[in-house]
Amino acid sequence: MPAVDTGSSKGFCPADAEVPLARVTDLSRLFGSFAALRQVSFDFEAGKCYALLGENGAGKSTLMRILAGLLPPSHGTVRLFGDQSPAEACGRVGYMSHAPMLYDELTATENLRYFAALYPRGQSLTPEAALRQVGLDPALPRTVGKYSQGMRQRASLARVLLAQPELLLLDEPFSNMDATSAHRMVELLAGMRAPGRTIVLTTHQRELALPIANHLLTLREGRLDSVMDGGRAQA
Amino acid sequence: MTEASAEASEDVAGVDAPEVDVTGVETAGWFALVGTHLQKDLRIEWRSREAIQSMLFFALLVVVLFSMAFDPTAAASREIAGGVLCVATLFASVSVLNQAWTREIRHDVLDALRLTPADRSAIFVAKVLANFLFVTVVQVLLGPVFFIFYNLRPLGNGWLLLAVVPLGTWALVANGTFFAALSIRSRNRELLLPLILFPIFLPALLAMVLAVKTVLTGDGSDPHLLWLKMLAGYDIIFMTVSLLLFDTVLQAE
């Protein structure tokens, strides 16, 4: 199984001159004296699915938050869609965190109607269509606070899909799910792969990422430790 | 692949996307955005009733306990009533202002809001409006109780209260909502908010107390409505500053 050892701060930038969908260069993030990310460089290509693997504290969520534009890097750069910063590309990036990012007191449809109103019209899916995509009933009168963890994660995914983002950042989409719900989520994500859409997900559960990921990236102590081809890893 | 998955991939590829919102306008207007945020806040409060209930209970306790502790005469009541009303409102509001951003923080909803391309100032204005409405509802319910317990009857222009109280309340909630946003990532935010808010709100508090006292006693000490004008000026300055700084506060990590 060929794992590539970086050994240098140059990372894994492909040699071809094509502009990647997302390019991170020498990315570092410090929290006080603790380095959550250390000189990570990588190119994310359009239409591919990447799984970020690593132990707790490896820097997966930090990298995702920087890609989403929620956290500024301490050093290094992130360019999305050619030459946009994450802040400039906010309408084209969808981010799902461990938390559902929805209001407990509202139903899934009310939550999604609220978020849909914050995106430019003509681009976003209707809340009902987004909920149906993740297999939830838009007419369900229950508030999100009364949902199971699996349903919450799917409702959260529906929120991300509203704006039809080209870059999907999914931080631990299988967390706290039972086996059935987790496999359901894998099926959903497999169905969302499309030529124009890049998916980056983080997980501890390597076996769940294998069926959908084109590349497996392993972070260790803030460094990009290895990159594997998804097909080879599965074999 | 499930049916839902297949539907998803088709939509992304642009082959079949029949349910895209195509109501025409490129982006929602600023006032529409404020309305969207406000509607959400009011709906959540209507369902939970957390803010108004806790505030009303606390404010009633303060008003009733003060009236029993001092047993004032009608003349003395007029002297202190403005202060009691303002302090009761201030203390009661702090609990609500502390919770103003809690729902946004609880499940990282604030991050989801930060990722939308919508104007962030609309979030702040809607939150101020929602808090203003909550405090106003409590004041309306508290008012009759207050006048009965303190045996009050305005000797000055009673209608001025309709300007003084809302202007003072706006000063409180605009500052409070802004500083609550500033302190949301702090571990001791419940302690931090009053520590920052009270000194800055002090000029508005003094203006509000003195304006209410002038109305209740009818002493004619403020013929040019100086306190009222000061409150209006305070509101304009602090609202403008808060609006200018809110996006920076929201993006701070």
Image (cartoon, coloured by chain):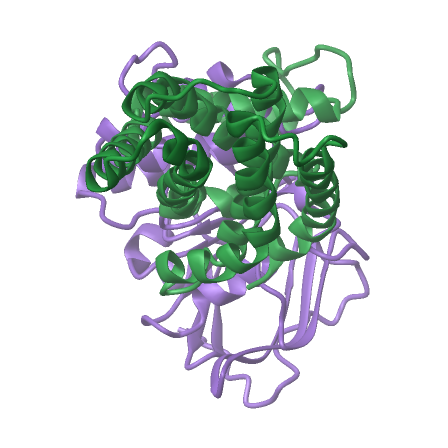
Q: Which of these two is toward me, B230 or B3?
A: B230
Residue B45 drawn at (x, y percent): 37, 25
Above-or-below relation of B141 to A11: above
Assign the N terminus of chain B to one quadrant of the image.
top left
The image quadrant of residue A45 is: bottom right
Q: Is residue B73 left or right of residue B207?
A: left
Image hue for chain B: green
Residue A141 drawn at (x, y percent): 29, 12
Q: Which of these two is toward me, A200 or B43?
A: B43
The image quadrant of residue B204 is: top right
Q: Residue at x 43, y 64 (%)?
A: B186
Q: Is residue B179 left or right of residue B62?
A: right
Q: Is residue A217 left or right of residue A124?
A: left
Residue B31 drawn at (x, y percent): 71, 22
Q: Which of these two is toward me, A25 or A69?
A: A69
Above-or-below relation of B90 to A84: above
Q: Residue at x 40, y 47 (%)?
A: B98
Image chain in purple:
A
Q: Which of these two is toward me, B170 or A138?
A: B170
